[in-house]
Amino acid sequence: MKHMRCEVPQLIIHNAAVHTLDGADTVAQAIAVSGSRVLATGEDREILPLAGAETRVVDAKGCSVIPGINDSHNHMWEAGMLMEGIITFGYQSIEALAREVGRRVAAMAPGEWLQGGGWVESQFVEGRMPTRYDLDPYSPHNPVVLERIFSTCCANSAALRAAGITRDTPDPPGGTIGRDERGEPNGLLFRSAKQLVRDVMPTAFGESKFGSGERIRAAIRRSQEDYLRYGITSVVEPGVTPSMIRAYQRLRDAGELKIRVNLMPCWHGFAINEDEDFSDRLVPELGLYSGFGDHYLRIGSLKMAIDGGLTSKTSLRTWNYKGETEIKPFPLRLDLEKLPGWVKEAHDGGWGVGIHVMGDVAVQKAADAIYAAYRANPADRRHQLVHCYYPSGDVLNKMAEAGMILAAQPAFIYNEADGYPALLEEAQQRTFLPLRSAIDAGVPIALSTDMPSAHHNPFWNLYAAVTRKGMHGHCLGEEECITVSEALRAMTQGGAYMTFEEKEKGTLQPGMLADLALLDRSLVDIPAEALRDITVQMTVVDGKIAYEK
């Protein structure tokens, strides 16, 4: 038995498979929790005698107990906004999605907006993007805007009217208004054209523009309740603005944060609007650096971004998409010539950086900038390459040497892989998000969902990391698959390591924070195809039961 101290636990879970994730990957039979910490793990015969009159004893019936999921790249406040409307992941046809839109607006007042998002065209049997013609029959009097996972949205006719978009509206700089064969807007708005409807949507991005942060706080309250249902106990929120930080701090002060949150302030390349960007002000003026805060709310790395998305064809790369003979130009999100200086400034000032990179060129540029800063000042900052779809062998070696973390989202495989045969050559499919190669090269891995770019169900994420399969079964190749144990560690301990909290959470060893999830089955020898069907029976945060099925 591994035991912390002589105390009476308030919770014991026994007859379980307790994945402690200690150095030996010990699977214990029982776990005891006292206060906010793990008291002991061991066999039933060792743990059960610790129970007192007030101890709650739970029979797990052979199911697994895991450390709480640490979703290390997740836009929780934005997820809460979507939950107010409609989350579009998982609908397998446009018709089914349109019917759900109709069901939702039937309960709304005429003129009230319905917002949602998360779709990608490969999830639909129709094999195309939805248009206003799909939504209009079900929502004639309510504006509806459904965001694709990146760069595009679908607006119905009522939303287009509210935004004043007609056949005579010109394409804005950096964007395109989708049109039908007659030249009429079809409801699809690409890149900067999305802003035309965003400007009239009742969405609270920040107090500076909308006057109140209550809607942000309400969104966070809403999303954290749903996250607890999935065993998520920690989140890294990337790209936060001053008003978002204020909202999180007010929730923390009021005792309303139920999930541990690590905030990544938006820096170069990641501003929602200019007024909300920290820009050059942050490093020299704030007087803080990564790690400021407590166990429930702290400041992490700075969020940066270079390129766009893969399926939107805005990744900075050397190769062509299927059927294309040239790389079409698109605007980058920051000045690449200034990137090394910005990274060095952050690194020397005590900050880590997490840089959004997708294409192989963007990945190389970010890795080179971080590597140069590290070699000049070899301090442990745990910088991250976020997404990092196509790292070369040189990049992986530099990441391992400089301690860079691959902040990856296998959930994108589950969402998008079924559409990749039409988009990517086989070589680009097989080398997409090479987790096996990264682990073998000694690169630390932290897995996340990037909700709302993918669903926050961590077990879809687990399934995709292990199988490299999309929701309809297309496999990107087995060479880059990782094991259940490796993926589980990256979904829990990986995020804690990324935020310098590996001595406090991410394992179930005595003395660690008692954040854990009781699953509905055992992970020991589980068939890979069953991973995506896992549900959570109980979630414990800080030693308290935060969710129970």
Image: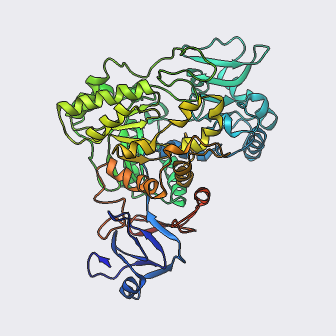
Q: In the image, is 26 to the left or to the right of 76?
A: left
As displayed, is residue 32 above or below residue 176? below
Q: Residue furthest right?
A: 137
Q: Which residue is at 62% across, 28% downward?
A: 423
Toward the front, the furthest residue is 479
* Residue at x 42%, y 77% (from the top left corner): 30
Here the colouring is rainbow
Figure check: 197 above or below 42: above
Q: Position of residue 414 (x, y in %)?
A: 59, 45
145 relative to 138 in the view: left or right? left
Looking at the figure, which quarter contains the C terminus?
bottom right
Position of the N terminus, as image quadrant, is: bottom left
Q: Give the image location of residue 384, x and y in percent.
A: 35, 38
Q: Residue at x 42, y 24 (%)?
A: 361
Of residues 1 and 69, the one nearer the viewer is 1
Along the viewing direction, whichever of 372 and 67 lies nearer the viewer: 372
Q: Position of residue 410 (x, y in %)?
A: 51, 44
Q: Which of the 4 image quadrants contains residue 246?
A: top left
